[in-house]
Image (cartoon, helix red, strand yellow):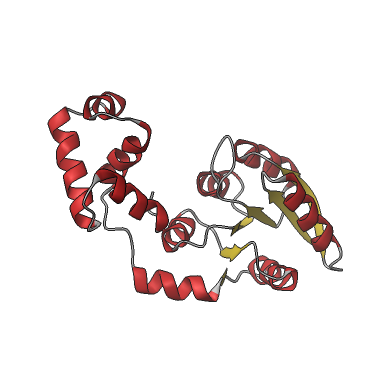
Amino acid sequence: MIRVFLAEDQTMFRGAMAALLGLEADLEVVGDVSRGDEVVAACERLRPDVALLDIEMPGMDGLEAARRLRSAVPETRVVIVTTFGRPGYLHAAMAAGARGFLLKDAPVAELAAGIRKVAAGGQVVDPALAVAALSEGASPLTPREKDVLAAARAHGTIADIGRDLHLSPGTVRNHLSAAIQKLGARTRTEAIDIAVSKGWL
């Protein structure tokens, strides 16, 4: 019996997924949470074979939860199950130690097959997303450029961004300018939109 754990903030979807997976003879859903910051403690207690994590959850996103789970409960294999089929998210998920990346609109039979494959030590990735990720490539942004662009989403001024990241205004401008240029954008807002759409932010 493969022990499965679910982390998903949409109650209806989480319940439906648990019910459908519970119909599979060899799968047992042993627990679920609605917040990313509850994943590690729950998996330390339940010791599931496979954890299905959404990306966008309150408390902590699924990618960070996957990173922490890899350290805390390395025997639990992670599959990201998300609405957001963005190539950058796939790269980030694999870097975080996930063994699978599937979209929520996949048939339950495909999800169950993916769980079995990952539990057996394999990997599973949505085929269309794998092709897109290969053609898109990795993010061109440096970690600092990504930090500055992410801070720009929340703050209106260069001074605010600088205070948030402990950088001088000139350094913030340089990083923003580099990010805008690398992304082929004309403005900071357009650069943020591009980075978000590709899963790089």
Whether residue 153 is situated above or below residue 85 in the rendered picture: above
Total marks shown come to 0
**Could you tell me which residue is drawn at 47 percent across and 72 percent down?**
130
**Could you tell me which residue is drawn at 77 percent across and 47 percent down?**
31
Task: Kindly tell me whether residue 39 is visible in this rendering.
Answer: yes
The x, y position of residue 125, in whole percent, is 55, 70
The x, y position of residue 25, in whole percent, is 87, 68
The x, y position of residue 68, in whole percent, is 53, 43
Whether residue 46 is situated above or below residue 105 in the rendered picture: above
Task: Kindly tell me whether residue 1 is visible in this rendering.
Answer: no
**Could you tell me which residue is drawn at 22 percent across and 25 percent down?**
159
Quadrant of the frame with the N terminus:
bottom right
Where on the picture, by quarter, is residue 103? bottom right
Horizontal side of residue 171 vs 71, given as left or right: left
The x, y position of residue 197, in whole percent, is 41, 56
**Could you tell me which residue is drawn at 58 percent across and 58 percent down?**
83
Horizontal side of residue 22 vs 183, given as left or right: right
Horizontal side of residue 37 vs 5, given as left or right: left
